[in-house]
Image: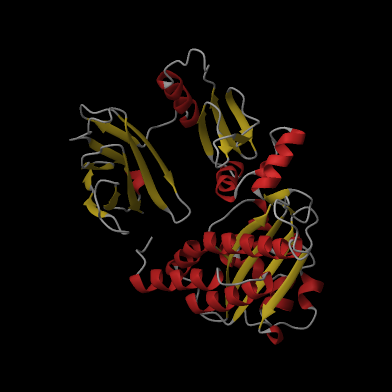
């Protein structure tokens, strides 16, 4: 992954500021399409709202005259009729190019290309998918007639995709909140915001107290705050989590609210496409969870070939995964804290590190700025290695591949 230039990062921040100034979904859509075309030059920008349950697509292209009138509805119809839409609907993807969703030779002989894409001047396309609601997805796309979209283009879109999703969710909630408060209810009125499918998406503190009083603590994920929903979304889309004790929200007075993972009672449980390992703790005689944590980690990680190895006197817990930006992120936790872990040698298998020979170190005690501290990785046979800086509590080593 090429390291993004400061100008690209600055432009992405400007895009984010513009989005969060939008007060309606329509205004957000206009700002998003305009901003995306400035970040990644394109001849045509597209906005597709997809109902995941029915496959219905509401399509908009700018400029509208770029596409033959009625061609999208006639050729595509629903999400199954477009490879990019169906790919994003199947699971969460980073920015996806058209050539990655369908084999180019097959596309060239398709009705989609002959009747819609080619007449619209779209020889190359790239899309990002966001989910502001659980049963609806928005796919924003860019198309152009010349020049394939680069890795830089994809990295920029991956950088702004979470911002677009959060801004769209906020704009939808703001519209519903305005409608809910249009009658200027008296102080103390409980406000509950529902999505289009009747699920609770936002609720005021008074509403949460009233619901808990009359119905008990809810086990519905729609009752959770946005930042907690992000955790559930991570797991439901294929991520893993280890939960120790009762993982629940609480109000400003410290009263426990809904559980984040009510499905997970003890041991491994499937949650959506992901997994949660629940470690129960008896409040009367709480045991040390260290052994259970080790057991949970082993079960989560499996017993396949290890891509990381550590050597030294310090005890570290290490976990690595490829993030959506195609970096290898190595998370490290010092198990001997508060005693710092020093002089630890880290080996990363070549298959995991890819072509990466430089890492970027992030730790709370080392103020290295937003780009991290540059660390060299030394080739050694079929792996790369480096001596890690001292770790007080935890740290992250990011390796562009």
Quarter where residue 220 is shown: top right
Q: Position of residue 199 (x, y in %)?
A: 75, 48
Q: Residue at x 72, y 77 (%)?
A: 116
Residue at (28, 58) in percent of width and height = 369
Question: Which quadrant, please, contains the C terminus?
Answer: bottom left
Quadrant showing the N terminus = bottom left
Give 20 or 116, whichever is nearer the viewer: 20
* Above-or-below relation of 211 to 279: below
Task: Left or right? Give the position of 315 relative to 269.
Answer: left
Residue drawn where x is 19% and y is 35% of the image: 342
Extreme residue toward the bottom, this view: 65
What residue sits 25% from the left and 46% below the top? 365
Across and down, in percent, residue 166 comes to: 57, 59
Residue furthest to the front: 187
Observer-nearest residue: 74 or 280? 280
Residue 207 spot, x, y in % from top left: 71, 46
């Amino acid at each position: 992954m090429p390291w993004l230039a400061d100008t690209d990062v600055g432009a992405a921040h400007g895009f984010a500021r513009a989005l969060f100034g939008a007060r309606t979904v329509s205004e957000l859509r206009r700002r998003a399409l305009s901003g995306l075309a400035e970040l990644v030059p394109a001849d045509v920008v597209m906005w597709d709202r997809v109902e995941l349950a029915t496959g219905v697509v509401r399509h908009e292209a700018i400029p509208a005259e770029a596409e033959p009138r009625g061609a999208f509805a006639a050729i595509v119809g629903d999400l199954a009729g477009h490879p990019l839409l169906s790919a994003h609907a199947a699971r969460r993807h980073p920015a996806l190019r058209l050539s990655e969703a369908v084999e180019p030779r097959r596309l060239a002989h398709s009705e989609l290309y002959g009747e819609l894409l080619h007449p619209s001047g779209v020889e190359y396309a790239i899309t990002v998918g966001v989910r502001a609601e659980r049963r609806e997805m928005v796919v924003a796309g860019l198309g152009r007639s010349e020049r394939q979209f680069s890795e830089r283009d994809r990295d920029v879109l991956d950088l702004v995709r979470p911002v677009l999703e959060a801004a769209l969710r906020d704009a939808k909630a703001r519209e519903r909140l305005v409608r809910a408060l249009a009658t200027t209810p008296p102080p103390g009125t409980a406000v509950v915001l529902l999505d289009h499918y009747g699920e609770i998406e936002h609720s005021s503190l008074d509403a949460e107290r009233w619901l808990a009083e009359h119905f008990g603590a809810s086990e519905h994920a729609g009752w959770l705050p946005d930042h907690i929903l992000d955790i559930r979304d991570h797991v439901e889309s294929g991520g893993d989590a280890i939960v120790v004790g009762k993982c629940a929200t609480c109000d400003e007075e410290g009263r426990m609210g809904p559980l984040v993972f009510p499905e997970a009672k003890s041991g491994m449980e499937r949650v959506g496409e992901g997994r949660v390992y629940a470690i129960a703790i008896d409040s009367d005689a709480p045991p040390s969870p260290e052994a259970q944590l080790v057991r949970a980690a082993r079960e989560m990680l499996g017993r396949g070939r290890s891509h990381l190895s550590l050597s030294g006197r310090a005890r570290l817990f290490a976990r690595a995964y490829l993030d959506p930006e195609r970096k290898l992120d190595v998370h490290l936790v010092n198990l001997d804290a508060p005693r710092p872990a020093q002089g630890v040698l880290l080996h990363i298998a070549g298959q995991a590190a890819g072509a990466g020979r430089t890492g970027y170190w992030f730790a709370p005690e080392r103020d290295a700025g937003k780009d991290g501290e540059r660390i060299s990785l030394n080739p050694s046979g079929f792996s790369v290695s480096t001596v890690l800086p001292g770790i007080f509590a935890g740290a992250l080593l990011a390796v562009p591949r």
